[in-house]
Image (cartoon, rainbow, N blue to C red):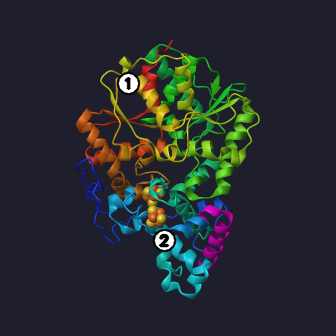
Amino acid sequence: MKLSNDNTVVDTPQVVGRYRVIPLIQEGASAASQTAKATADIQESLGLPGTLVDDWHDKAIARLGQLLKARRGLRVFMDTCTKCGACTDKCHYFLGTHDPKNMPVARQDLLRSVYRRYFTWAGRLFPWLVGARNLDKSLLQDWYTYFHQCSECRRCTVFCPKGIDTSEVTMAGREVLASIGLGQQYSQEIIGKVHSIGNNLGMKPRALADVLQSLEEDILEDTGVAVRLPLDDEGADMLVVTPSADFFAEPHVDGLIGYAKVLHQAGIRWTFSSEASEAANFALFTGQHDHMRDIALRIRHAAMGLGVKRIVIGECGHAWRVAYSFLDTLVGPMEFLSPEHPRAEHICEVTHQLLTQGIIQLDPSRNADVVVTYHDSCNVARGAGMGDIDGGQFKIPRALLAASVPKLVDMSADTTGQATFCCGGGGGLLTDDLMDVRIKGALPRAQALQAVVSSDQVTHLVAICAICKTQLTSVLPHHNLSDVQVTSLHHLVGDALVLT
Ligand code: SF4
Ligand code: SF4
C-alpha cells in the first residue's frame, strides 16, 4: 500500500471509460494489505484461542474436516471446479488490485489445495498431480491475507457454470483461522460488542434513547409534525430492527428519519428495541454459525418481549440476507407473528405496500433537481428476495425511487441487478487497515457510476445497505466522484412524503 504524507492512498486506479479492462496480473500486488488480527481478549471472549495455538496445523485440518462434514455445499464446491476460468475477471478486488490470488478460482484454491492434500486419496498419494499442498505457515499467511480480501459478495458465483459459492469458501477459511487463534480484529470486536452491549457501536440503551429523542426534536423543527421514534414500546404492532449506524452516521440517519415519517404517516404503532438495537450480524462474515444464531436470537427475544406482530428490517444488506434467508432456520418458527406477516419484512417492502395501497403519497417534485442512480447491494441482490414479487429486491427499491424523484437512471446492466458490483467494503472489510483494498475494489462501481454521471448528470447514488453507504462515502472521492451524494433510499422517500 502506498501512502502519501497525509496518509491518503496514492496509487488509486484510474476511472477511465465505461468498460472494464481485464488487467495484466501482478503477483503479490496486494499481499501487503493486511487486516489486524483479533486480540487475545476479544478472541477469548468469543470462546476462541487468544493467539495461534501450538498445534495449529492439526487443529486447522481437524476443523476443516468438521466443516466439510457439516456443510455439504462446501465439499461440493471443493470437488466441482473445472478451472474453466469464467470467474477469473469477475471479482472487483482482482480488477482493482491485479493480484492473481484475488481471482475467485485462485482464492478457492487456497483452501481446495489443502482439502485435496488431506481429504482425497489422490492428494494423499500424488499431491503434485492434483494441485494438493501441505498447510504450512506460508499458505496459512495467504489464507489470512486473501480470505480478508473477499467481501463474500457472490458476484463470481453468478458467472460460475457450476454455481460455486466463493463466499462459502471464504467463510470456511475464516472460521478455521479463528478456531486456531487467528480471528480478525474488526469483525470479532463487533460480534463481541453485540453480545455484550447489543449493537455494533457499543451504544447503551440510555444513549440510544437520547439520540432518538433528539431526532424527534429535529424532525419537529424541520417539518412541524410530531413524528415519534419510540423505544421499547410494549404492545406496539411492529418492531423495527435497523443497523446501528442508522442512529447517527451520515447518510444513514436520514434514512432512519424516513422510516419514522412513513410509519407515522401510515398510522402504524411501531418501536425500536434496546435489546435488539442492531440488525447487522457479522457472524455471517466470519462463518461462525453459533454466534450468528445467538445474535439472531436477540431479535426473536425482543419481539416476543414487546409483544409485536411484525418484524421489519431497516436498510442493511447482510442483515436482510440473514433475515430473509436464514432467520427461520436459525431461530424460527416465528409463530407469534401475525398470519398476514409471518416472516421478517424489509422496510422497502413495507413502504412499497403502503404506497401501492394509497395509504401514503409521494411527491417527486419535492426532490427537484435530484437525478438518482441505484446501487444494488450484494447481499440483497444475490442473497435475498423482497416482497412476494419475482425480482422484488431489484424492482421494489427502484419503484420507490421512481415515485420519489424526478429522474432515475440505471447504471449499465453488467453492473446492476444480479451482476451488481460490490461497493468494495462488505464482508468484514470496512476497516481502515484495508483502505487500500477497499479503494481499489470500488473501481468497477466507480467506473459504472462515472458513466451515468457523464451521460445523465446523476447527482445521487442510493443504497439500502449501511456498509455500502459508509464505504462509498469514503472511497468515491478517491475516484474523483466526490460530487455524487451517497444517500439512503428512505431519505429521498421521507423528503418526498406528503406528511400530515
Ligand atoms: S465472492 Fe465477491 S469478493 Fe469474493 S471472490 Fe467472489 S467476486 Fe470476489
Ligand atoms: S467459474 Fe466456477 S468452475 Fe470455472 S474456474 Fe471459476 S470456480 Fe471453477
Give the residue drawn at x 74%, y 35%: 304
- Foreground of the two, 224 or 83: 83
Determine if the magenta segment contains residue 376. Answer: no
User: For mark 1, does the 10 Å Cα neighbourhood hold few (<14), some (14 to 19), or many (20 or more) residues?
Assistant: many
Image vertical order of residue 83 relative to residue 275, above or below: below
Relative to residue 110, is residue 40 drawn left or right? right
Q: Residue 125: x percent and y percent?
A: 57, 88
Secondary structure at numbered mark 1: loop
Relative to residue 328, is residue 478 drawn left or right? left
- According to the picture, the residue beneath numbered tag 2 turns out to be 109
Q: Quadrant of residue 199?
A: top right
Q: Residue 115: x percent and y percent?
A: 57, 75
Q: Is residue 40 visible?
A: no
Specify whether tag 1 is near ligand 1 (CB below 8 Å). Answer: no
Secondary structure at numbered mark 2: helix
Placement of the N terminus among the 4 image quadrants: bottom left
Q: Residue 71: x percent and y percent?
A: 65, 62
Q: Which mark is residue 405?
A: 1
- Foreground of the two, 266 or 106: 106
Give the residue drawn at x 68%, y 50%: 294
Measured Cα–Cα span from mark 1 to mark 2: 46 Å
Give the residue drawn at x 31%, y 45%: 448
- Foreground of the two, 493 or 193: 493
Q: Is residue 435 visible?
A: yes
User: For mark 2, does the 10 Å Cα neighbourhood hold few (<14), some (14 to 19), or many (20 or more) residues?
Assistant: many
Label 1 sits on what residue type?
A: Val
Earlier sequence position, callout 1 versus callout 2: 2
| Magenta range | 57-74
Determine if the magenta segment contains residue 70. Answer: yes
Q: Which mark is residue 478?
A: none
Label 2 sits on what residue type?
A: Asp
Q: Quadrant of residue 483?
A: top left
